[in-house]
Amino acid sequence: MTEQKDLKELIREVLLAVHPVGSLFFTSDDRNPDVILFGGGYSKWKRIEGRFIYGASENRPIGQTGGEESHTLTLQEMPTHNHKGIYWSYENEGGWQVDLNVGTIGYGLSWQGLGGSTTGGGGAGDPNKDLQTASTGGSQAHNNLPPFAVYAIWERIE
């Protein structure tokens, strides 16, 4: 071999030793690391796509995958919360009663006279019952991605 070929082979051997099987290679170049580092035909690499790198721990062993790009919260995952309401009732001697309940989202009014009742809005309130508010929200999945920068990530497999 010529001295120049010997030097190229030595450089390839060093690069292969620095990037052993199982190592990761991050780059802003979209080409396979075998082409970038060795000129092609010296190693095999698998591209990691659509994944963040997460440090291994007792609860997250090497090789585990998981997570989701978007997620719709279940009832159990929503923070515990209340919708506040106000109940107010007025009754005069003539037989009229006025009830008003106001929630954080809607309102209801009712009134009664001697000959019947009329209801507007969400109906009569009952101070002995929970107030109900109108439904809100679209139940759409939300994005779960932290701030990120995208690079090509490769794992050497041979």
Image: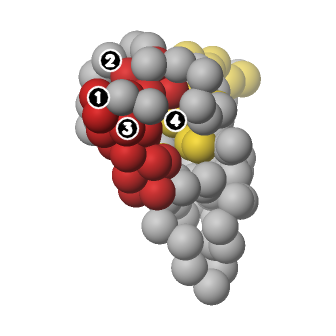
Q: Residue at x 29, y 34 (%)?
A: 3
86 vs 123: above or below: below
Quadrant of the image occupied by residue 62: bottom right
Q: Which residue is mark 4?
A: 154
* Foreground of the two, 86 or 137: 137
Mark number, residue 6: 3
Q: Indicate the amino acid at tag 3.
A: Asp
* Foreground of the two, 94 or 13: 13
- Going from N to C along the chain, the mark reached first, 2 or 3, is 3
- Residues at badges 2 and 3 in contact (C-beta under 8 Å)? no
Q: Indicate the amino acid at tag 2.
A: Asp
* Disc 1/disc 4 C-alpha distance (Å): 29 Å
Q: Which residue is mark 1?
A: 4
Please state the horizontal and vertical placement of residue 48, each as a whole percent of the image: 58, 34
- Going from N to C along the chain, the mark reached first, 4 or 3, is 3
The quadrant of the picture occupied by the C terminus is: top right
Q: State which mark lies toward you, 1 or 2.
A: 1
Q: Residue at x 50, y 27 (%)?
A: 34
- Going from N to C along the chain, the mark reached first, 4 or 2, is 2
- Going from N to C along the chain, the mark reached first, 1 or 2, is 1
Q: Secondary structure at mark 2?
A: loop
The quadrant of the picture occupied by the N terminus is: top left
* Disc 2/disc 3 C-alpha distance (Å): 28 Å
Q: How many marks?
A: 4
Mark number, residue 29: 2
Please state the horizontal and vertical placement of residue 156, each as a whole percent of the image: 59, 43
Q: Indicate the amino acid at tag 1.
A: Gln
Q: Secondary structure at mark 4?
A: strand
Disc 1 residue crowd, few under 14, some 14–19, many 20+, Cα 10 Å:
few
* Disc 4/disc 2 C-alpha distance (Å): 11 Å
